[in-house]
Amino acid sequence: MPTRRLAALVLTSLLAAGCAAPKTPVHIGPPLPASELAIVQAQDPANTGGATVRFHLAFESFMKVGDGQRTFVGDARNGYPTRISVLPGDYTIITRCVSGNYWAYPAAELSLEAGRIYTLRCGVSPHNLTSFRLTMDSIE
């Protein structure tokens, strides 16, 4: 019996570790101060203004406009971050939006400036209740 309990504990720990969101991915290159990077973060799902349906947003990948190279920052195995840091510029940000058993990968093109924090949120599209939309919540 103790062997089964230990095996169950180890398995649970491994599964929990696989579901944890990764640390904030930073741009690829030498470390830079925050004032030289743009930060894109997901709105806290607990801060939905009293909405009864919660949407969880995380980041899947991003691509500098005109570059054509997609940088993946999250996946189902390692988790999806809720905050990324990138060099300033024009980007296509691909997110993962989840609500209950439904999910989508909405994207947005953003012009990001150094030293700013951009907060995104997702929700139901008002024109098509079966699809999700991505909106800018705030810029700090």
Image: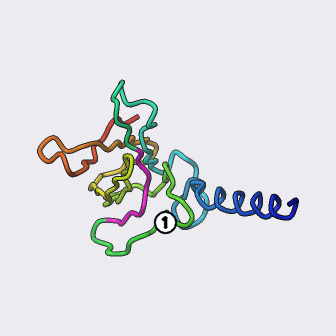
User: Which residue of the protein is positioned furthest toward the front in this rendering?
Assistant: 1
| Residue for badge 1 | 75
Please, is residue 102 above or below residue 65 in the view? above
Q: Pick the quarter of the image with the N terminus.
A: bottom right
Q: Nearer the viewer, residue 85 or 29?
A: 85
- Tag 1: residue type? Asp
Asked which quadrant contains residue 18, the reply is bottom right
Give the number of marks.
1
Measured from the top left, where is residue 119 in percent x and y?
39, 40
Type of secondary structure dominating the magenta stretch = strand
Q: Is residue 35 left or right of residue 102?
A: right
Measured from the top left, where is residue 135 in percent x and y?
27, 43
Count neighbours of disc 1 (C-alpha within 10 A) and say few if under 14, some if 14 to 19, many if 20 or more.
some
User: Which residue of the protein is positioned furthest toward the bottom in this rendering?
Assistant: 68
Query: Does the magenta-highlighted stretch encompass residue 60?
Result: yes
Q: Nearer the viewer, residue 37 or 71?
A: 71
Point out the stretch of residues depicted in magenta: 56-64
Measured from the top left, where is residue 111 in percent x and y?
30, 52
Please, is residue 29 above or below residue 32 in the view? below
Q: Nearer the viewer, residue 104 or 29?
A: 104
Q: Pick the quarter of the image with the C terminus.
A: top left
Residue lying at 31% horizontally and 57% vertically, measured from the top left: 104
Residue lying at 27% horizontally and 70% vertically, measured from the top left: 66
Residue lying at 44% horizontally and 69% vertically, measured from the top left: 71
Q: Is residue 109 left or right of residue 62?
A: left
Please, is residue 137 above or below residue 11 in the view? above
